[in-house]
Amino acid sequence: MDYKTFKNEVSNLKAYYRSVEQIETDLELLWYELTGVKGIQYDKQPSSYNQSLSENYRLELLDKIEQKEKELDYTRMVIDHDLRQLNHLPSDIRDLVELIFIQGKTFAEVGKMVGYSDRGLHYIVKREIEKL
């Protein structure tokens, strides 16, 4: 696998996790809206009910739910793919990759922790990624 491609994919994992949380929240709100649960307001005069408008709105909500579910499935598929790629790395390199690309630490910081220079660490990580 290409080093730059792997780096970009793994670096976006945090964003994908946040995206999954946001999509799940949006889905919950859409399902709540679709159920039509409303509170009673005693200070308002009841309004008329239009069956065709209500059905159109319901169909729009169902379309939005379907789109969000597709988006959620795609995002989860990308996360699974990235995690599978990470799992193919040796455990010590995987830990280094998580520190550098996911947590955002620099090669110099991680190199000091493991006893390598930043260039040496970069070379080791790049070599293992390209073996994939």
Image: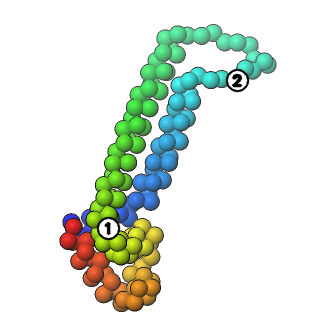
- Secondary structure under the numbered disc 1 in the rendered image: helix
Q: Give above or below for 45 relative to 121.
A: above
| Amino acid type for the residue under numbered disc 2 | Gly
Classify mark 1: residues with Cα within 10 Å, few (<14), some (14-19) or many (20+). some
Task: From the top left corner, tell me how far across and down residue 12 is, in percent.
Answer: 39, 60
Task: From the top left corner, tell me how far across and down residue 114 is, in percent.
Answer: 41, 85
User: Where the C terminus falls, by quadrant?
Assistant: bottom left
Q: Quadrant of residue 88?
A: bottom left
Left or right: where does residue 119 sit relative to residue 61?
left
Q: Residue at x 30, y 72 (%)?
A: 90
Task: From the top left corner, tell me how far across and down residue 79 is, in percent.
Answer: 36, 54
Residue 9 visible in this rendered orientation of the protein: no
Q: Residue at x 30, y 77 (%)?
A: 125
Q: Residue at x 75, y 21 (%)?
A: 41
Left or right: where does residue 75 sit relative to residue 29?
left
| Amino acid type for the residue under numbered disc 1 | Lys
Distance from the alpha carbon under mark 1 to that under mark 2: 50 Å
Residue wearing tag 1: 7
> In the displayed image of the protein, which residue is found farthest to the right?
43
86 or 44, which is in the foreground? 86
Residue wearing tag 2: 39
Classify mark 2: residues with Cα within 10 Å, few (<14), some (14-19) or many (20+). few
- Secondary structure under the numbered disc 2 in the rendered image: loop
Q: Earlier in the sequence, mark 1 or mark 2?
A: 1
Q: Give above or below for 124 relative to 21.
A: below
Q: Give above or below for 76 relative to 97.
A: above
User: Where the N terminus falls, by quadrant?
Assistant: bottom left
Task: From the top left corner, tell me how far across and down residue 24 is, in percent.
Answer: 49, 42
Q: Quadrant of residue 120?
A: bottom left
